[in-house]
Amino acid sequence: MKLESTLRPRRGLLHFASMLDVVFLLLLFFLLSSNAVVRSGIAVTPPQSRSALQAAAGADIVTLSAGNPPQVFFNDRRVSLEELEHELADGAGAVGRKQVVLRADEVAPYGQVIKISNIVVGSGYRLILATRPEVSE
């Protein structure tokens, strides 16, 4: 016995709904995996460099802003140099990875960059200097 349906097939709407789900999932995936999620919220303009390293996932971020006086931030929290030294000595940063990315503004005082570098290296962390790609003119 052969059974036949009297309903007309409506395949267009069903395929569109599943495609829309896939598009939204891809959009969500790309938004959550973007570099903006990892970056520090303090606006600085790092110096240009020809060399490039891969991103250091899970590293602590120390930001040195330009200004009078320059401000130091450890993982988006403003600290003094003494507090930074205590934070790094206590190992309050990323678990398992002893890396610190130093994001210094290109017009920040060079002496401050060296002071922070000495604190980071003296605390047993590996120092990574953040730069931006060099623009060819």
Image: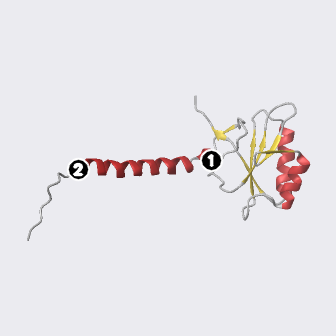
The type of residue carrying mark 2 is: Arg
Q: Secondary structure at mark 2?
A: loop
Q: Which residue is mark 2?
A: 10
Q: Look at the picture and state if 14 lies above or below 98.
A: above
Q: From the viewer's side, name the closer residue of 21 and 105.
A: 21
User: In the shown orientation, is residue 134 left or right of residue 72?
Assistant: left
Residue hosting label 1 = 37
Cα distance in 3D space between marks 2 and 1: 42 Å
* Residue projecting furthest to the top: 137
Q: On the image, which quarter does residue 71 sit in?
A: top right
* Coordinates of residue 30 in the picture (x, y in percent): 51, 48
Colouring used for the render: secondary structure
Residue 45 placement, left or right of 87 = left
Locate residue 28 relative to residue 80 in the image: left or right. Answer: left
Residue 52 tag number: none
Estimate the x, y position of residue 6 in percent, counting from the top left. 14, 55
Badge 1 local density, few (<14 within 10 Å), some, or many (20+)? few
Q: Quadrant of the N terminus?
A: bottom left
Nearer the observer, 81 or 115: 81
Q: Could you say which is closer to the camera, residue 90 or residue 127?
A: 90
